[in-house]
């Protein structure tokens, strides 16, 4: 009982101190509620609150520049607002593949007379499933792979099917150089589906955890015939692939998108060589003279523009043109 009273009094004291001293208190309460944060101790919470305030200051400064027309995208509070950029980086677990391995695959080629559309949005053509949420599981690679598989399957069979990430997390393991919720890459995951086939999301639902493989071969819906790589650093080839083929799996440096809210993302601090997050290019276009990519992310619909990121196109922004690939069914 005494403990409880002391505990309550200290919460009250902390609350009063926080409420009295800064402008971010309401947003902090809302953030904790929305993202169901329960910290282990008051010390832990107070450290998280400090990080949150520093992040919000950064966001406010950025949005001040946005309001003056000096930035092309807006920032906001995301589920990562109580993480330092170092901690956020730890969450990004895409492992870039070695160039050697990619060279063994088929390379995407535009047939001579094919005309690449000026813009395209595969969502409008029904080839893209709803935005998914990987939660705290670092399996972006699996979400990127199911994304291009879903597109290819739709374009071949005229039926939109959501495919299973959990099957890849559980079954496509170390042997393929993949590590479930601890990270992975794209082509080996396609290779797994080529050899073993893919189950649907509803038959093999997402658990946000590594689990035992329980693939059921009588529930395999499709296999992959071949894996195609788009030539590295050739963004025109990536435009042609997205324009002519369908949604394409890509990898990016996602460190600077921790607080992305809306608009066309571009940043000088984005690396063009260090990839750490796999996503899905589902289209491209131009707005007010600015060329952009439409990127499907796997951080839920609350992130960015309903789960999507618009990203500057034509400058290999965040390394988007480094390792694109897709399956052929
Ligand atoms: C490209 O040209 C070839 C030969 O003239 C023709 O058979 C084919 O249909 C053309 N493809 C497209 C996409 O126009
Ligand atoms: C595999 O799926 C089939 C078809 O739905 C079902 O009859 C069978 O019981 C499943 N096997 C296992 C081991 O779950």
Image: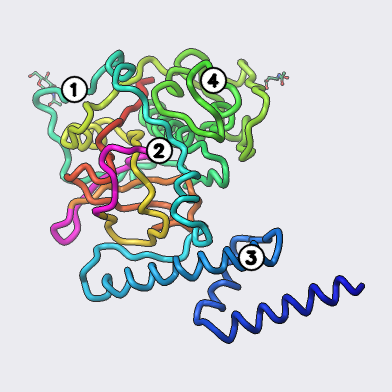
Residue on which disc 4 sits:
174
Q: Which mark lies nearer to you, 4 or 2?
A: 4
- Label 3 or label 4, whichever lies nearer to me, is 3
Q: Nearer the viewer, mark 1 or mark 4?
A: 4
Q: Nearer the viewer, residue 285 or 126?
A: 285
Q: Nearer the viewer, residue 11 or 156?
A: 11
Q: Does residue 229 appear to the left or right of 131 in the view shown?
A: left
Marks 4/2: CA–CA distance: 18 Å
Label annotation for residue 278? 2
Mark drawn on residue 206:
none
Residue beneath the point at 23% across and 29% down:
232
Q: Indicate which disc, 4 or 2, sits on the residue closer to the N terminus.
A: 4
The quarter of the picture where the C terminus appears is top left
Horizontal relation, residue 122 to residue 179: left or right: left
According to the picture, the residue beneath numbered tag 1 turns out to be 109
Which span is picked out in magenta?
Answer: 268-290
């Amino acid at each position: 009982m005494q403990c409880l009273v002391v505990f309550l009094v200290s919460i009250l004291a902390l609350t009063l101190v926080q409420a009295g001293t800064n402008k971010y208190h309401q947003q902090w309460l809302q953030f904790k509620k929305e993202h169901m944060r329960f910290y282990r101790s008051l010390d832990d919470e107070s450290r998280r609150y400090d990080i949150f305030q520093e992040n919000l200051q950064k966001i406010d400064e950025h949005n001040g520049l946005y309001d003056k027309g000096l930035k092309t995208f807006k920032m906001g509070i995301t589920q990562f607002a109580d993480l330092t950029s170092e901690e956020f980086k730890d969450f990004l677990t895409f492992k870039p593949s070695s160039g050697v391995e990619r060279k063994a695959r088929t390379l995407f080629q535009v047939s001579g007379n094919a005309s690449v559309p000026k813009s395209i949005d595969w969502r409008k053509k029904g080839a893209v499933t709803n935005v998914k949420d990987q939660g705290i599981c670092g399996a972006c690679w699996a979400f990127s792979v199911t994304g291009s598989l879903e597109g290819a399957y739709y374009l071949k069979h005229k039926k939109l099917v959501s495919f299973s990430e959990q099957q890849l997390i559980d079954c496509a393991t170390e042997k393929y150089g993949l590590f479930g919720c601890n990270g992975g890459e794209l082509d080996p995951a396609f290779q797994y589906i080529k050899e073993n086939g893919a189950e649907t999301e509803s038959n093999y639902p997402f658990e946000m955890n590594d689990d035992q493989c329980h693939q059921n071969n009588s529930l395999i819906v499709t296999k992959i015939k071949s894996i195609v790589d788009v030539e590295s650093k050739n963004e025109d080839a990536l435009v042609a692939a997205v324009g002519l083929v369908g949604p394409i799996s890509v990898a990016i440096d996602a460190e600077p998108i921790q607080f992305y809210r809306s608009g066309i993302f571009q940043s000088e601090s984005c690396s063009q060589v260090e990839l750490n997050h796999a996503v899905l290019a589902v289209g491209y276009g131009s707005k007010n003279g600015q060329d952009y990519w439409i990127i499907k992310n796997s951080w839920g619909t609350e992130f960015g523009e309903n789960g999507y990121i618009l990203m500057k196109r034509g400058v290999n922004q965040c390394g988007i043109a480094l390792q694109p690939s897709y399956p052929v069914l």
